[in-house]
Image: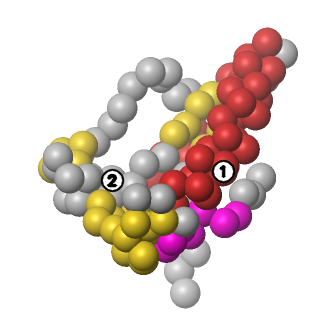
Amino acid sequence: MYHQGWDQHNDLPDHQTKQSRDIDQPSAALIKDLKQRGLLENTLVVCGGEFGRTNYCQGKLTDDNFGRDHHPYCFSMWMAGRGIKSGIGYGKTNELGYNIVKVPVHVHDFQAAMLHLLGVDHEKFTFKH
């Protein structure tokens, strides 16, 4: 599934609230439904984007209208289902959320982990070009 429009360079308080509301209950319902049907153990659910957001503001910089720029080095994702231990966090940023201070994960390692959880050997799935 795809939910676009998370690129909030401005109007972040309004847009973030609305979009979070869009996915909060449906995401929880999906996990609950998969679990009740016995499908969660065979399904990998991943929620995230291709980058995070800086911890500083951009845009109009008023109390109700500001944004944040792209930040490719620190961001969060959540996963559930197939082999994922619930309730844990992995990695840590500094107090500003700007730099990784514990257990950095490269995107290639993240992709390899997802493939492993799906029963695919990432080294046999690599095509040299």
Specify the color scheme: secondary structure
For residue 57, which quarter of the picture?
bottom left
Magenta segment includes 8:
yes
Find the residue positioned furthest to the bottom: 129
Q: Which residues are magenta?
A: 4-10
Q: Is residue 72 left or right of residue 21?
A: left
The percent position of residue 90, horizontal first and vertical second, equals 33, 37
The residue sitting at 20% across, 59% down in the picture is 99
Residue 108 colored magenta? no
x, y percent for residue 32: 73, 19
Q: Is residue 122 above or below residue 20?
A: below
Residue carrying label 2: 105
- Horizontal arrangement in the rendering, residue 30 relative to residue 61 (left or right): right
Residue at the (17%, 46%) spot, across then down: 95
Disc 1 residue crowd, few under 14, some 14–19, many 20+, Cα 10 Å: some
Locate residue 45: give its quadrant: top right
In the rendered image, the vertical position of residue 6 relative to residue 39, given as above or below:
below
As drawn, which residue projects farthest toward the right? Answer: 37
Q: Are marks 2 and 1 in contact (CB under 8 Å)?
A: no
Above or below for 119 versus 60: above
The quadrant of the picture occupied by the C terminus is bottom right
The residue type indicated by label 1 comes to Gln
Nearer the observer: mark 2 or 1; the answer is: 1
Spot occupied by residue 11 in the image (x, y as percentages of width and height): 54, 66
The majority secondary structure of the magenta stretch comes to loop
Left or right: residue 75 compared with residue 79: left
Q: Quadrant of residue 63?
A: bottom left
Q: On the picture, is 13 further left or further right than 68? A: right
Decide if residue 71 is in sight here: no
Residue 85, percent from left and from top: 48, 23
**Mark 1 lies on residue:** 19
Distance Cα–Cα, label 2 vs label 1: 26 Å
